[in-house]
Amino acid sequence: MAPIDIPAIEEQARKLRAAEIQRINGLFAERARLVASLAAESLGVAAKAMSDALRPLFSWNPHPSTKPLSLSAAPAVERVNHAMRALFSWNPQSR
């Protein structure tokens, strides 16, 4: 019967453990990058929606208006609708 080489078995176990740790670190880094890119994209869409919502407040004209004011809320509702659709429409599987 051949003798058991315990140091060689321990060395092989250390190498396998190191390879598994590297694999898990790679998976973690890849998923963290994906989550960060999705969060950045969502923040960009939110910032654009916020700028579109605030733009009318800061784009006033001190000259008298030549047309009557419209009291419809449709443009504001449409902007909010587009902003909400853009915020919640990303699909992580499509990348």
Image: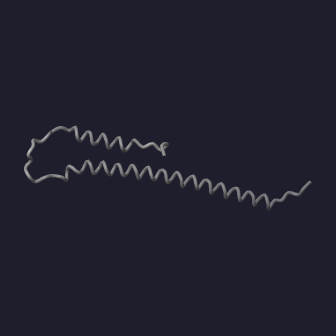
Residue at image point 83% right, 59% down: 5
Residue at image point 31% right, 41% down: 82
Q: How is the image coloured?
A: one colour
Q: Position of residue 65 (x, y in %)?
A: 9, 47
Q: How many marks?
A: 0
Q: Position of residue 85 (x, y in %)?
A: 35, 40
Residue at image point 27% right, 51% down: 51
Q: Position of residue 95 (x, y in %)?
A: 48, 46
Q: Where 91 falls versus 23 (above or below)?
A: above
| Furthest residue in direction right, as rendered | 1
Residue in front for this viewpoint, 16 or 94: 94
Q: Where 88 falls versus 36 (above or below)?
A: above
Left/right of residue 23 with respect to residue 90 in the rendered view:
right
On the image, which quarter does residue 67 sit in? Answer: top left
On the image, which quarter does residue 84 sit in? Answer: top left
Residue at image point 52% right, 51% down: 31
User: Which quadrant: the N terminus?
Assistant: bottom right
Left/right of residue 39 with respect to residue 14 in the rendered view:
left
Left/right of residue 22 with respect to residue 50 in the rendered view:
right
Left/right of residue 95 with respect to residue 82 in the rendered view:
right
Q: Where 84 falls versus 61 (above or below)?
A: above
